[in-house]
Amino acid sequence: MRLEPLTFVCVSTPRLNNLSRMLPKILPFVDKALIVVGREDIKAISYLTSLGDKVRIVFRPWDDNFANQWNAYLPHIDSGWILLCDDDEVPSDGMLHSLEGLINNSEKGEKYSLVKFQANPITEEQDLGPSNYYREMLFRKSPRMKYAGGQKTGCHQYLTGYQNSRVKMCPEVYYHIKSLKEEYRNAARNYFIYGIWLHGSTDGVQREEWHEMKEILSRIHPEVQTFMDLDPLLIAGTIGKELKEWLVRTYLKYKDHNEYNEMRAFTLYYAKYLHPEENLL
């Protein structure tokens, strides 16, 4: 018997295929689930609602700020433990069966208030096996908890205000399932929001090409305020000649510079994974 409650949390755009893959596995092992969704997707909302009272939807419009989106779930959890996964992550059976023991043996967070699990990447149907990366995925709720990060202080969110600094490393794995197309999309998203990320930097570098992209979008697609607004246009191929020329121009200018991965990813996401028929490159 678990001595303290366990809430599962996932922040999603939402992506129905990913949610329907992970939630049936996780729900039997938690007391409730909070899904933070960034847009009103009818099919995804219908699926989440069909799962019953155990699943609660928290709606917050996506604004290209990761910390803001993750902070949305914290007011809805008073106490106990939180299991947090992205929607492209699926806990292994071993990880799920370890949760009760980890919570019960923590002495209400005094021995450890945070558990890290080992990543096992799966890309393009290939299981790459356990990696050297461990992620913070199970932690005890503290009143001081808050996510930081964002456009001014770093790309992705990070959680502060843990009960204490005691961490337990768990060898049980979670599967990070991501296609190359998704990897390029995420890199394109990060470039759109933050610019390029140089080695050792804590924030994006917004070079002249980034400002040029934003200026072009402001003229030809003023409706685009976030990457979630832009992505459907990229998928449909309706971004306009001027932006396509920018994609090609910046890619050719920096294709041999290793530090400009996000900029190249923006072009490759469109030209290689969405519209190879256009033969832009």
Image (tube, helix red, strand yellow):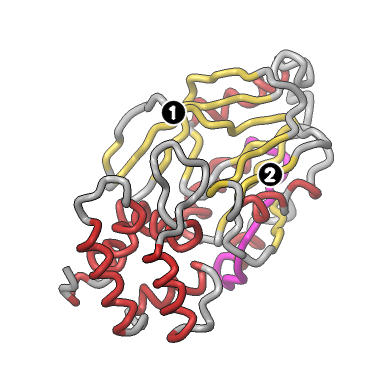
Above or below, comparing residue 79 to residue 134 in the picture: below
Q: Position of residue 207 (x, y in %)?
A: 41, 60
Cα gap from disc 2 to disc 1, whole angstroms: 21 Å
Say whether residue 43 is magenta: yes
Q: Which residue type does callout 1 highlight?
A: Tyr
Q: Which residue is mark 2?
A: 147
Q: Which residue is mark 1?
A: 133
Q: Position of residue 6 (x, y in %)?
A: 72, 35
Above or below, comparing residue 240 to residue 156 in the picture: below
Residue 111 left/right relative to 12: right
44 vs 123, nearest the viewer: 123
The residue at 49%/57% (across/down) is 194
Secondary structure of residue under mark 2: strand
Callout 1: few (<14), some (14-19), or many (20+) C-alpha neighbours within 10 Å? few
Q: How many marks?
A: 2
Give the quadrant of residue 108.
top right
48 vs 195, nearest the viewer: 195
Numbered range of the magenta stretch: 29-44
Image quadrant where one finds the C terminus: bottom left
